[in-house]
Image (cartoon, rainbow, N blue to C red):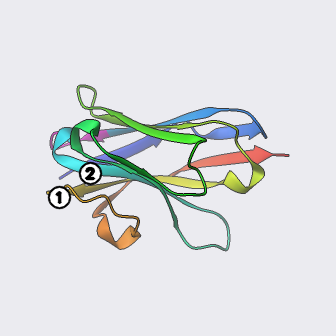
Amino acid sequence: QVQLVESGGGLVQAGDSLRLSCAASGRTASNYVMGWFRQAPGKEREFVAAISESGGHTYHADSVKGRFTISRDDAKNTVYLQMNSLKPEDTAVYYCVAKTDSTFLSGSPGWYNVWGQGTQVTVSS
């Protein structure tokens, strides 16, 4: 089984940058799609970004395109989310996800079969 552990969340001001990390353990990280979702209080989980195995393809939500960048380092079994120009509306719990045995990048939370515990990101105005 694959386990995911996020880190890097925190409290920042609007306009700041933050990088989230997600370390995968268990099966080799390069064999599956990975991504990020977020959930703000009182709202549904929202797709943020996904990346194919070996990082050849990425998919970003329109709400973060141009500000956030997903990447992965398979040698370290880690996926990253670089977040720039943060806005108060980016405040949420950010979850790392993985989909084993697939190459399809989906924006649907039901597609992913492994979830991390989440890390809080708070952006003050």
Residue 84 horizontal/vertical position (percent): 64, 36
Disc 1 marks which amino acid?
Ser
| Cβ atoms at labels 1 and 2 below 8 Å apart | yes
Residue 50 horizontal/vertical position (percent): 38, 51
- State the residue position of label 1: 102
Residue 90 horizontal/vertical position (percent): 67, 52
**Image check: 57 left or right of 65?**
left
Disc 2 marks which amino acid?
Val
User: For this rendering, which residue is in front, 117 or 60?
Assistant: 60
Residue 28 horizontal/vertical position (percent): 16, 39
Q: Is residue 117 visible?
A: no
| Quarter location, residue 115 | bottom left
Find the distance from the CA under tag 1 to the CA under tag 2. Answer: 7 Å
Residue at the image point whose x is 65% and y is 39% from the top: 10
Q: Tell me the tag on residue 33.
A: 2
Query: Is residue 11 located in the magenta-colored stretch of the structure?
Result: no
Q: Main secondary structure of the magenta part?
A: loop
**Image check: 42 left or right of 70?**
right
- Magenta region, residue range: 24-28
Q: Tell me the tag on residue 61.
A: none
Q: Which residue extends farthest top? A: 75
- Within 10 angstroms of label 1, few (less than 14), some, or many (20 or more) residues? few
Residue at the image point whose x is 64% and y is 63% from the top: 40
Q: Is residue 16 visible?
A: yes
Vertical side of 30 occupied by 76: above or below: above
| Quarter location, residue 124 | top right
- Within 10 angstroms of label 2, few (less than 14), some, or many (20 or more) residues? many
Residue at the image point whose x is 17% and y is 58% from the top: 102
